[in-house]
Amino acid sequence: MKSPPSSDITLAWMEQRHPDLTAWRDYAVRWLAKSNKDVIFKLKHLRVFFEEYLARLNLPTSPEMFLRKGQVWPDFSASIMHVKITDKRRIVCNDHIADFLSWIIAEDFSDLEDTGHKVPLPSFANPVRRIQKVADRTIDDPSLRPHVDKSLRWVVKLYPELAAWRLLAIDWLAGQTGPSKPKLIALQSFFREFIIGEGLPTVPEQFFEVTSRIPDFYEVCLARRSEFYARPWTTHMHNFSNWVLNKRLSIVGPDGVRTIPKNYHNPILKRTVKTVAKHFDTTLSWVTESRPDLEEWRSFAAEWLAQETRGIDSRLKALVLFFDRYLIGQNLPATPSYLFSRKSLVPDFYVTCCAKDKEGGENTGEKAANNNNRIHDFLDWLLKTHFSCDDDDGIPVVSPAYRNPVPYRSHSGGSTNRESVYSPLPFGFIEDMRLMLAQGPTFSDWTWAHNALGRQAATNGRDASDWFSVNEKDIDKNDPDCVWRIRRYEAGHSEYQMWSPIRWVALLFKLQLPFRVFQVRMLDSGEADTWRYADGKWLENKHELAQGTKRRPLAQGLFRRVDHLKDVKQQAILYVNTNKSADQKKSGPAKGYEVPWPNNGPIHQNPFYWAERLRNWQEKYNPIKRRTSWTELKANHIQLKGPAQLATYPDTCFLFRLREVPLDERHLPMGITAMNRPWYELLLALQERLDKTGQYDSGGMPFAFVPPYEESNGGVTVYFPLQSLRVSLITALALDGMVPFSILQKLVGHSRLLMTLYYTKLGPTFVGTELAAAAARMEENSAGSIKRFVADAKHDELMKKVAYNSAPSIKSVIAEDPGARNPAGWMLLHHGMCMVGGNTAEVEENKKVGGCHNGGPNVGTELQPKWAPVPGGSRNCPRCRWFATQPQYLPSLVATFNNHAYHFDEARNSCMAAEERLQEMRRLKFEVEASGQPFQQMADFLEHERVYEGAMKKFSDLAETLVATWRLIERCTTLLKEGLANGNQLVAVGDVNDVAVAFEETESELLQLSGVCEGVEVYPDLDAGKAVFRRSQLLDLALCREGSVPVFMTMSEADQLACGNAFMRQLANQVSPNNVQLGMRRVVELMDSGEQLGQMLGIDVAKLVPSLVAQSRKVIPIRPVPAAQPNSKKAV
């Protein structure tokens, strides 16, 4: 049958082929007549709808019957899958038909309201849902787009009848945290596609009536979009509806409690799936959802975890890595036997999953090895348990056909931190934050903390997480520790709220004591102890939870009684009931350790004062009826542990239990992340305070403790995490307080002195100060160190610990027997040692004597060698076979490299200029000869060729010298790392990973010149070239910008070098006294940008100039040149 014409908007073909669809045809013609876009496509899609859907499936020929509610028709999009069109076109076809049917309902099956809007009759509905989002073509103003318009003005512009809904949504959004875009998009779907699209009540009260028939919002969303959007939108709207019910439609009873009237309910059901996070799911149920065929693997892994009692958290994380990135990520076969088979070629687990993170970054070291070894243990257990047979003695023997594909890896191959990875905060800042929190002796005085997490008592806005609703009768208005307020809302109602000091006192504890975050959260209040510490005295505990006897008292609380001990003046010390790895083989009261912390000083420094005050607050406003078992703790309270391990902890009255959480959780300690936001706000407040008072770091930059809020993961990420406070306090006690490490070790609960050293961050400044004298003494003797080493070391050891260019040459001049060596024939250089005494001339009587004349490569044969001179000329030691050096010469080698790099740049520039001139001459020669004329400038052409060849030769020699110097530096670096790894070297700060040298390409000419000049002053053997004069020009230019006269041009070259270096060092020291290199870079940046140093740095540069002139020993006289007269002629 001939297909209908695609341009016939009258659809005349339907009269012959489908006369029973006349009513449908009439609607289609009217709809097309009103369409002004995509008419051709709509014609094609209408044909699909009529022929491939209605006619083919024998569906109702009457539009009214087809559009009535309660009818179930085949899904249109699925029913036209047989039509040969693309998936994208199929979606467009679906949406065109959805629009067509919606138009029919609006035309003939709707009522007109007083507002002028058409509302579909309750008995009609569109059975075809749009797949794509309806474009909002009625809004031309970009600021009114629904996903960016936080004021929801688009709602009243399009749907004035939703004005009441809009006000509710604005108030709800004002109190929400996190990104607003997802909520705005959910509100758009709620208003347009649900309220308006489904013809639901536009009055909120009617919408929430129990008698109202409201369809399932989730199903409505799912009909138009995927579950990816439907589920979170439903969650947002469920929360929005709850907020409306609780904040706007609820009523306050006589007892002050807010309740929702019984005739209201939330018609939007929350469609969240309760899942356990991967790292807390010990059954690994998520594996079968990702790959059901891995069920056998999953059951084995769950069985292995169940029989483990310790280290469950780390084992589970390793298993998640194994399943997620190895079995699933590498798409390996599902049977364990395949992985174990010796015939199977499988990816290296360590390389593919442990050594690199998901983003491809390096992840070597102890963590990577631990993950690898956990899986090795799991596979080893699996082989012995399920893939082995017992021998005659009952010992399981693994089949020879199987092997463990994950070999065990030692930690020696990776780096190990010798210090904590956290940077310490200066103790002065810690003291400032203590004072910011503890502003007075009661919780009422902590005014900053009251409003740190939210707004003050006002009308609307987000409720801070540390305020909670209470009845008026619960408030003790005479208690200075009871902080309360009345919260008023725009709807007219109000409620009483109290402030919870729990997380803030915990934060103060972290600022006062060198405890871990976990230790602080798990502290016991002592409410069940036999004795009670109050006002500096011990009394019998009258609390209903009190246990123990005087002979056998229960003492699990933070306060530990010591007044019964001899020679002890203090009534109490602190008791920490957890101690990480030291608790592993302990149980009950044996866990933890005592801390003899002083109970004196100002209250902002006294943990005893605030612990007692918080305990009293908890007893009064958040009482408990029993001690809490650790087996009740959830994943947000404690790192994953097995039931057997949790059972070893005694029941606890947690001091830091939150009152603001749901009732069934108020006896539990605060969660792992509860202190993150308060810590962020405290650091931010300190940062702003320092900025306002004009306090900056040594580089003149404002202090930065937190990133910008949009980069802080919702006010959580900081530059100094909470764990850094432990590092800071231990460092302050050790270095500033000079507490002996033996005492400090007990104070912080370390079982080994090494751990105390690990947490003590010495820092480069402290080490530099302490080792300055030692460095001076070492410098006096460093020159002869390599000479003594070469003279005394064993031959094999010497060849392994010296950097050289030619092993045979070095061996030929160093006797194997140390006693036969003659150090008198060796010459020390600034960057190493010449093994042939620095000889530069050939000895006619004995041409085999080594020197610069034969220090180059072999140009003869292996049997009859003939050694060429050193490439680059005499004393080009980095390319000489007689040269040797050691790691202690790294600074001078780097200075030599920088010097060569400068000359290399100069030679490159000369080479490029010569090449440009030669190319111009070649072009000219070609043009002249092409015209048939003789080239008259042949002599100039040959001269340019000679100059170019000479420049290229110099450039090539310097390039090879640069590479040779770099190789020596790399070799010395390797020797130093090997020495560190073997324990033969001592580095003050850092470890083997800190020993590195790298290229740094700089665009600053002045920075390069300054480095070269510094090196020439320290090592006179280096050739400065034009570097001194060129730097003097740049420095004089900088002085001219300051209004000073140029002084460097009046000095000799030697004085320009010395005074220029002194000038740069003075400027750098003014900018950054603690880091001269950083200050030097800052000064160079300002000079390069043409800025005035005095204005930018706040210093008077002119005062430095007289001292420079005084340092100059010889001034070059400059004859003043008279200014040219206006009518004078210039000499040519």
Image (cartoon, rainbow, N blue to C red):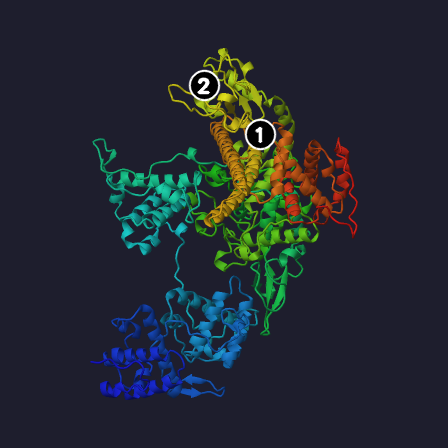
Quarter that holds the N terminus = bottom left
64 left or right, relative to 868? left
- Asked whether 114 or 175 is in front, the reply is 114
Residue farthest toward the top in the current orientation of the protein:
820
- The mark total stands at 2
Type of amino acid under label 1: Ser
Badge 2 element: helix
Gap in angstroms between the C-alphas marked 2 and 1: 25 Å
Residue 970 spot, x, y in % from top left: 49, 32
Residue at label 1?
892
Type of amino acid under label 2: Lys
Q: Residue at horizontal 58%, vertical 25%?
A: 830
- Res 1098 visible: no
Q: Check the image and report above or below for 326 versus 946.
A: below
- Asked whether 105 or 380 is in front, the reply is 105
329 left or right, relative to 895? left
Residue at label 2?
811
